[in-house]
Image: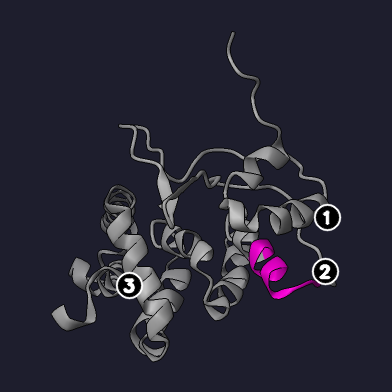
Amino acid sequence: MSEPEPTGDETLLRAFPSEVRAVAEQVIAGLPAADYPPVGDVSHSNHKKWDAITVHGEAVAIPSRIYNPTTDGMRGTADAETVRACLYSRHHDGHVRQAALPTLLRSETWWAIPFVVQLLGEYVIEICDDIAAYASDELPRHPAFEAEFQSFCADNPSFIALTEARARSYWAEYYRREHLWPDTYPALVALTRLTTPRRER
């Protein structure tokens, strides 16, 4: 007998490691009801099955898109705010995803890192610009968090390869005139920064 399909809340909960599941469960319970259930998995593609994403050795499954309306005035602990930003970074509206990003970057939270990396494999260049600027200017001032990014990238070569392939595809399709060479495209600039140890730059 096949296992039942997870509910929308269960799908969202699987995006977080066990250490933060209790907080995530509370945040998810407080979200406005979604217009549609979450869809996809950021570690899947149409052409092949890629390895699961792991954070500190624990597998997570992050949805490609969520459809919960945004809401103002919801506040909580720092972890709760970061969980909420992680979830809204998966929102179907690119403006909502971009608005969630600063909270993820300020949090310096290891379990938020795959949500940041995923944004580099998407088509909104303004978000990629924000991450590239952060990776070049701000992140080096926070060596412990920089080390967490390096560790995540080293532990997830399959996801990094998939993200780079997606970034190159968007560059070739939409941004080749603006960025003649791929090594100037913000998403790929950021990926290089995040995956290359400082001693090798």
> Could you say which disc has been placed on residue 190 in the image?
3
Q: Residues within 10 Å of mark 1 (few under 14, many from 20)?
A: few
SS label for mark 1: helix
Q: Nearer the viewer, residue 91 or 142?
A: 142
- Residue interval drawn in magenta: 75-84
Query: Does the magenta portion include 132?
Result: no
The residue identified by callout 2 is: 74
Task: Give whichever of discs 1 and 3 has the lower sequence position.
Answer: 1
Image quadrant containing the N terminus = top right
| Residue found 28% across the figure and 60% down from its top | 154
Asked whether the viewer can see residue 154, the reply is yes
Residue 15 x, y percent position in the rendering: 57, 49
> Picture coordinates of residue 31 (x, y %)?
79, 54
Identify the amino acid type marked 3.
Answer: Ala
**Crowdedness of circle 3 by 10 Å Cα count: few (<14), some, many (20+)?**
many
CA–CA distance between discs 2 and 1?
Answer: 9 Å
Q: Which residue is mark 1?
A: 30
Q: Which residue is located at x 18 percent, y 69 percent?
A: 181
Residue 187 visible at all? no
Magenta: main secondary structure:
helix
